[in-house]
Image (cartoon, helix red, strand yellow):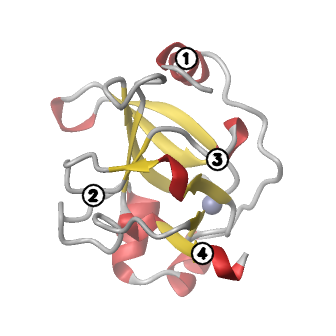
Amino acid sequence: MLGWIDVLYYTKYSNPEPYRRLNKTEEEWKEQLTAAQYHVMREKGTEKAFRNTYCRTYDSGIYACRGCGSKLFSSSSKYKSLSGWPGFSQPIAKAAVKYAFDDSHNMSRIEAMCNVCDSHLGHVFPHGPEPAALRYCINSESIVLIAETAL
Ligand SMILES: [Zn+2]
C-alpha cells in the first residue's frame, strides 16, 4: 500500500518503472481524443466539479487510461470524496501512476499522470481515507470504466 511518503519520494527522486511506454505526437493525440479529453489529458486542464461522468459512479470494474488503456484504479479503491471528482485511495499498482510537483495556480500540489503515456489524470493529496490516507483526485475525462463483466 502506498503512503504519502512514497508519493513524495516518487515525485522528488524517481517515479516507478512503467510496464511499457507509449509516445504519441500532439497531432495523434488530437485525432484520438475529444477536445475535452485533450484539454484535461494533454494540457493539464481540470473538468467541472460534480458535472463529470464518474463523480458519483460506484459500479464494479477497472478504471483504465483513456489515452493508452493502462489499468489505473480499481473500483474497490473508489470512495465518496465529496470533492466533485472521482476519488481513489490507491492506484491499482505502484507502477500505474507517475508523479510531478505542480506549482501552477498559486498552489503546491502533486500531479498524477499515467505512467505509460504521461496523460494528466489529476492530483494526489494526503487527506484520503485511512489507512493510507491518500486521495487521488482524478478527472473523469482521463479515465474509462471497464465493467467487471467485461473483464
Ligand atoms: Zn495512459
* SS for callout 3: loop
Are discs 4 and 1 less than 8 Å apart at CB?
Answer: no
* SS for callout 4: strand
Q: Tag 2 or tag 3, which sits nearer the N-term?
A: 2
Give the CA separation, mark 3 to mark 2.
22 Å
* SS for callout 1: helix
- The residue shown at (46%, 38%) is 89
Query: Which amino acid type is shown beneath numbered disc 4?
Result: Ile
Residue 4 place in picture, x, y as percent:
47, 19
User: How busy is the neighbourhood of tag 1: few (under 14 within 10 Å), some, or many (20 plus)?
Assistant: few
Are discs 3 and 2 less than 8 Å apart at CB?
Answer: no
Return the residue at label 2.
46
Return the residue at label 1.
12
Return the residue at label 4.
146
Give the CA separation, mark 1 to mark 2.
23 Å
Give the CA separation, mark 4 to mark 2.
22 Å
Return the residue at label 3.
92
Which of discs 4 and 2 lies nearer the camera? The answer is 4
Are discs 1 and 2 less than 8 Å apart at CB?
Answer: no
For ligand 1, which image quadrant applies?
bottom right
- The residue shown at (36%, 59%) is 139
Query: Which amino acid type is shown beneath numbered disc 2?
Result: Thr
Relative to the observer, which residue lies in front, 98 or 148?
148
Q: Tag 2 or tag 4, which sits nearer the N-term?
A: 2
| Residue at the right extreme, as displayed | 19
